[in-house]
Image: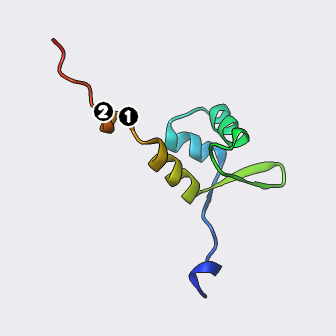
Amino acid sequence: MSIANLPTAYLTIAEVAEALRLSKMTVYRMVRAGTLAADRFGKSYRVPESAVEEYIRVSGNPLTENPPGPRS
């Protein structure tokens, strides 16, 4: 079996929401807007783990990128 034939790991909308600390509705909006890639399986969406990792990489974490300065 080659790398290309390996199955893609998928997450549910609820799992993505928990991982990103967002509401499920926000994740649905992101999927519909095309901000977060997802595949439709019947009536439900599944989000590839790679899409979540890419979203985190592109959006970044403002807490680690620009830490607030000391308070005066």
Q: Amino acid at mark 2?
A: Asn
Residue 19 screen position, x and y as percent = 50, 44
Query: Residue sitting at 69 percent across and 53 percent down?
Result: 46
Which dot marks residue 36? none
Q: What is the CA distance from the residue labelled 1 to the residue labelled 2?
A: 6 Å
In the depicted structure, whether residue 34 falls above or below residue 29: below
Of residues 25 and 55, the one drawn nearer to the viewer in this rendering: 55
Query: Residue sitting at 73 percent across and 40 percent down?
Result: 32
**What is the quadrant of residue 13 in the picture?**
top right
Q: Are marks 1 and 2 in contact (CB under 8 Å)?
A: yes
Residue indicated by mark 1: 62
Query: Residue sitting at 45 percent across and 49 percent down?
Result: 57
In the depicted structure, whether residue 61 falls above or below residue 52: above
Q: Residues within 10 Å of mark 1 (few under 14, many from 20)?
A: few
In the depicted structure, whether residue 52 falls above or below residue 7: above
The N terminus: image quadrant: bottom right
Q: Residues within 10 Å of mark 2 (few under 14, many from 20)?
A: few
Residue 36 screen position, x and y as percent = 63, 46
Q: Secondary structure at mark 2?
A: loop
Q: Amino acid at mark 1?
A: Pro
Which dot marks residue 66? 2
Query: Residue sitting at 51 percent across and 53 percent down?
Result: 54
